[in-house]
Image: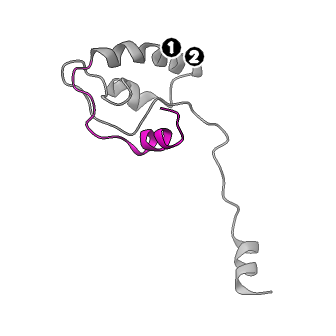
Amino acid sequence: MNLNDLNRETRPPRERCPVTVESPCILVCSIDRSTGHCFGCGRSSAEITNWLVYSAAERRAIMDELPARLDKIERKPRRVTKRQRLALERGEG
């Protein structure tokens, strides 16, 4: 038995979050002053803050509104996010 085996036996297993929460976040976090919505995802500050508290149905209802909100935001993000770049590389965008 070596030191790595000993550490593996005494170390508690890593716990993983059993629930995955759907999120519209694209890692462009900046609020448009005129609309109050995020440039990246379209959510309001309150919605972003409370996202994990909402039920799945509440999150889905908000997500259904986001495309219309994003259309109202005048200034678009200037940079391509890592997620967008990876999607483009995979041919998804």
Q: Nearer the viewer, residue 91 or 13?
A: 91
The vertical placement of 8 against 34, above or below, is below
The vertical placement of 12 against 67, above or below, is below
- In percent of width and height, residue 32 lies at 23, 26
Q: Which of 58 and 28 is in front in this view?
A: 28
Magenta-highlighted residues: 73-93
Badge 1 density bin: few <14, some 14–19, many ≥20, Cα 10 Å? few
Q: Which residue lies furthest to the right in this view?
A: 1
Q: Name the residue under label 1.
A: 61
- In percent of width and height, residue 85 lies at 43, 43
- Name the residue rendered at 39%, 30% in the picture: 48
Residue 41, image quadrant: top left
Relative placement, left or right, of 32 versus 80 is: left
- In percent of width and height, residue 75 lies at 22, 26
Q: Name the residue under label 2.
A: 57
Disc 1 + disc 2, Cβ < 8 Å = yes
- Name the residue rendered at 30%, 28% in the picture: 39
Q: How many marks?
A: 2
Q: Nearer the viewer, residue 43 or 68?
A: 68
Identity of the amino acid at label 2? Ala
Give residue 9's mark.
none
- In percent of width and height, residue 38 lies at 31, 28
Model colouring: one colour
Magenta stretch containing residue 62, yes or no?
A: no
Identity of the amino acid at label 1? Ala
Residue 5, image quadrant: bottom right
Q: Which residue lies furthest to the left in this view?
A: 34
Magenta stretch containing residue 77, yes or no?
A: yes
